[in-house]
């Protein structure tokens, strides 16, 4: 594998609506790192949020930051302590590298490490670049039957896999998913693979529901301003009963309220979406029926599971891929994500200069 020493084009976010393509030095891998030729980088809602608002909660873009965290690459160089990879390997990149020293890391909850490095969460640079270095043990070799586009999709799929583990989804579960955006859809794929017998996906947008239906879900269209008890009745009617597992993938207060009320006694509500910092919820309904309300945060040791599910054919992420751009057209790609023109689900940016549309 050769490196083009003159080209490390990178997509750098300078502030609100100020995303620039510029050259950066090619980084040198440390002993436990690999240098990657970046291949495919998906656009996540958080990337768009940073572009439009310059911040997510307390995380503020105060200095130029490379964007992108849903990525795959090809190994071009390995540090001297790296044993799991060799140049030429194609990998999915888990974007969060924890400190490995704190009590969360030591007890296995490394995704909760307060000192985690996470691509494209300020101040940490992301990986929408031609070249990028990363901890070798957070790079997962792709099997021969998976391509680099699948590799980039392992990031959102890991969010779905982790959410289903938090919801203890198992054979025969009846599942409600609120929201048919990319995270709702990866949650759907994961719940199906875990053996849920019936899954209903609710959203306000018809085109999103059409995709959920293609992926095997029952669907419910919610009307803007529709009464919450009417929505609950519709969910029960379509399912022929109550869901015992509910995933809110919207963060919207009305949806979280519905989740608390509609979930079967002794069931589990998983809050995947992040909404307002404070919400008014019918908690008594959940408390007196022993409904557990659980958070979920990114993923924790889920990448290999996500890869294995795709490699074994139990999950296909291909239907989520709707748009492709070359890196030079990054601003166009982000504009499509912002405007939602053409109803994108997953927009992929190709960082390899040799990529051509098929
Ligand atoms: O793919 C990981 C990911 N995590 C998101 C959003 C999008 N993509 N999260 C929501 C925002 N939080 S955060 O804690 N933060 C900016 C660090 O508010 C992380 C999880
Ligand atoms: Zn993301």
Image (cartoon, grey):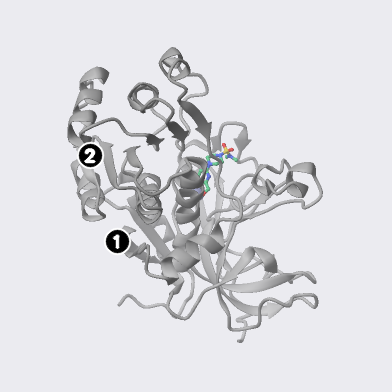
* Total numbered labels placed on residues in the image: 2
In this view, the residue in front, 137 or 263, is 263
Q: Is residue 12 above or below residue 46?
A: below
Q: Earlier in the sequence, mark 1 or mark 2?
A: 2
Q: Which residue is mark 2?
A: 205
Q: Is residue 9 above or below residue 158?
A: below
Q: Is residue 20 above or below residue 259?
A: below
Residue shown at the point (52%, 61%) measured from the top left: 305
Element marked by disc 1:
helix
In this view, the residue in front, 278 or 314, is 314
Farthest-out residue, bottom: 1
Horizontal and vertical percent for residue 160? 45, 49
The quadrant in which the C terminus is found is bottom left
Residue shown at the point (37%, 27%) measured from the top left: 259
Horizontal and vertical percent for residue 247? 40, 37
The quadrant in which the N terminus is found is bottom right
In this view, the residue in front, 201 or 236, is 236
Q: From where the camera sits, is residue 103 visible?
A: yes
Horizontal and vertical percent for residue 81? 80, 75
Q: Which mark is residue 68?
A: none
Q: Mark 1 and mark 2 in contact? Answer it, CB < 8 Å.
A: no
């Amino acid at each position: 594998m050769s490196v083009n020493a003159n080209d490390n084009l990178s997509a750098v976010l300078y502030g609100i609506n100020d995303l620039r393509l510029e050259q950066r030095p090619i980084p040198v891998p440390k002993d436990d790192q690999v240098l990657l030729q970046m291949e495919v980088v998906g656009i996540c809602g958080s990337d768009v949020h940073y572009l439009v608002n310059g911040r997510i909660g307390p995380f503020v873009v105060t200095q130029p930051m490379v964007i992108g965290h849903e990525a795959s690459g090809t190994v071009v160089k390995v540090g001297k302590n790296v044993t799991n990879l060799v140049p030429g390997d194609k990998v999915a990149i888990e974007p969060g590298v924890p400190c490995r020293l704190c009590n969360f890391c030591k007890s296995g909850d490394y995704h909760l490490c307060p000192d985690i490095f996470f691509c494209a969460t300020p101040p940490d640079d992301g990986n929408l670049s031609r070249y990028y270095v990363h901890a070798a043990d957070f790079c997962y070799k792709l099997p021969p039957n998976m391509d680099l586009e699948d590799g980039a999709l392992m990031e959102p799929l890991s969010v779905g896999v982790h959410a289903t583990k938090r919801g203890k989804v198992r054979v025969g579960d009846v599942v409600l998913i609120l929201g048919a955006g990319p995270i709702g859809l990866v949650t759907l794929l994961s719940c199906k693979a875990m053996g849920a017998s019936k899954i209903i996906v609710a959203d306000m947008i018809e085109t999103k529901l059409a995709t959920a239906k293609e992926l095997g879900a029952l669907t419910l269209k919610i009307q803007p301003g529709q009464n919450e008890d009417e929505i609950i009745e519709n969910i029960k009617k379509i399912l022929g009963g109550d869901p015992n597992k509910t995933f809110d993938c919207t963060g919207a207060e009305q949806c979280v309220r519905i989740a608390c009320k509609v979930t079967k006694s002794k069931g589990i509500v998983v809050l995947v979406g992040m909404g307002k910092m404070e919400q008014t919820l019918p908690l008594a309904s959940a408390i007196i029926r022993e409904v557990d309300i659980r958070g979920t945060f990114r993923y924790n040791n889920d990448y290999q599971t996500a890869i294995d599910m795709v490699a074994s054919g139990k999950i296909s992420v291909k239907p989520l891929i709707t748009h492709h751009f070359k890196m030079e057209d990054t601003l166009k790609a982000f504009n499509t994500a912002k405007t939602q023109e053409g109803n994108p689900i997953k927009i992929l940016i190709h960082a390899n200069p040799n990529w051509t549309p098929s």
